[in-house]
Amino acid sequence: MSAADPTWFTVDAPPAAGLWLDRHLVRGTRPADGTRVTAACGRELRVGPTPECDVDGLRLTGLRPCWACAERAMGRAPGAATRHRATRHRATG
Ligand SMILES: [Zn+2]
């Protein structure tokens, strides 16, 4: 799954916190601008161009993926533990 997958489209939204716009994923094909949709993370959004917003005069231009959307799009529950091979570190010195 990627943002280029034709079964998903992205919608950018002002962040809940921080200085990066959130890029959410919505299943399906992109409808007309102004259409209300629900992102994979559950957030209600309105389809449209990347919003222009600023915080205390600082224009937000950076984007970050919504990790809850990304995990749901990959079929995982948001926040689920990722399996990593345990690595042992020995104290040296
Ligand atoms: Zn999201």
Image (cartoon, rainbow, N blue to C red):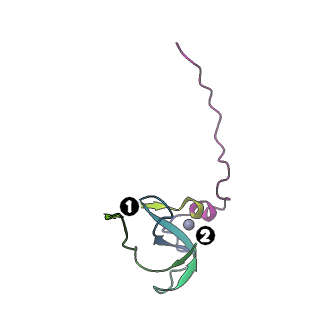
Determine the residue positioned at 61% across, 65% down: 73
The amino acid marked with disc number 1 is Gly
| Lower position in the chain sequence, tag 2 or tag 1 | 2
Residue 89 is inside the magenta segment: yes
Q: How many marks?
A: 2
Please, what secondary structure does the residue beneath circle 1 have?
loop
Q: Is residue 68 visible?
A: yes
Among the 4 quarters of the image, the one containing residue 18:
bottom left
Residue 2 is inside the magenta segment: no
**Residue 17: image x %, image y %?**
49, 60
Prevailing secondary structure class for the magenta stretch in the rendered image: loop
**Residue 20: image x %, image y %?**
42, 60
Check disc 2 and report the residue beneath it: 40
Which label was assigned to residue 62? 1
Q: Quick check: 14 left or right of 8?
A: left
84 is higher (above) or lower (below) than 35: above
2 or 1: mark nearer the eye: 1
Q: Which residues are magenta?
A: 70-93
**Figure quarter occupied by ligand 1:** bottom right
Among the 4 quarters of the image, the one containing residue 92:
top right
